[in-house]
Amino acid sequence: KERTPDDGFDRLIQCGQADDSAVYHLRSYTSHLHRDGTVEYLREGRAGVIDRGDFVHVKPGFNDDDELDNYRLAANLVSTKSGDTVRIIGDDQFVDQVLDAGCGVNHRGSQYVFQVTDPDQMARYDVIERDHRQYYGYDEPEVRTHSPARHDQVDDAPGDGYQPPRPFVG
């Protein structure tokens, strides 16, 4: 196993102390709840994601599609937690893959929000999120809604076009 600079195992997402989330029931994964509260999400009998509450461990997949599904599941699980602490532990590629999966969670209209608390990872997320918005067409030109009879300088103010994801309200 590779070790990270903080001397822990990599491919983890650190969450808050005892930060449990509900067990997901998915068609492509089988879930196994252990007595200690750990939930293993298995694909074809092999653990893909392990949720221990304060840590979510993302295992390598059989192929690229399995691996991407594991990232997506982990990002979804983390988005349902309190959000007090969310720090991704692993190499740069792993961190970027989890952040990209988190962008997917935030842009699909879920009631939950994926957000990291580490400042460096927040900056990386912003870059990935900007690329994500452009790639999927979220940065289309705004349509003017003001009346031509009335000119309001606020309508002319430049904007960056960013609109944060809206949580589900219902």
Image (cartoon, helix red, strand yellow):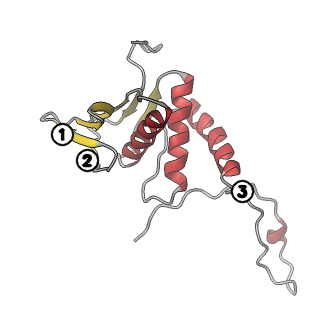
30, 38: nearer the viewer? 30
* Element type at mark 3: loop
Identify the image quadrant of residue 9: top left
- Residue at 53 percent across and 48 percent down: it is 104
* Element type at mark 2: loop
Q: Earlier in the sequence, mark 3 or mark 1?
A: 1
Mark pair 2, 3: CA separation: 35 Å
- State if disc 1 and disc 3 touch (CB < 8 Å): no
Task: Rate crowding at label 1 as few (under 14), some (14 to 19) or many (20 or more) other CA atoms within 10 Å.
Answer: few
Number of marks in the image?
3
- The residue beneath circle 3 is 139
- The residue beneath circle 2 is 23
- State if disc 2 and disc 1 touch (CB < 8 Å): yes
- Residue at 87 percent across and 87 percent down: it is 149
- Counting from the top left corner in percent of width and height, residue 20 is at 27, 42
What type is the residue that disc 2 sits on? Val
Which mark's residue is nearer the viewer, 3 or 1?
A: 1
Q: What label sits on residue 33 in the rendered view?
A: 1
In the drawing, does residue 50 fall left or right of residue 120? left
Mark pair 3, 1: CA separation: 41 Å
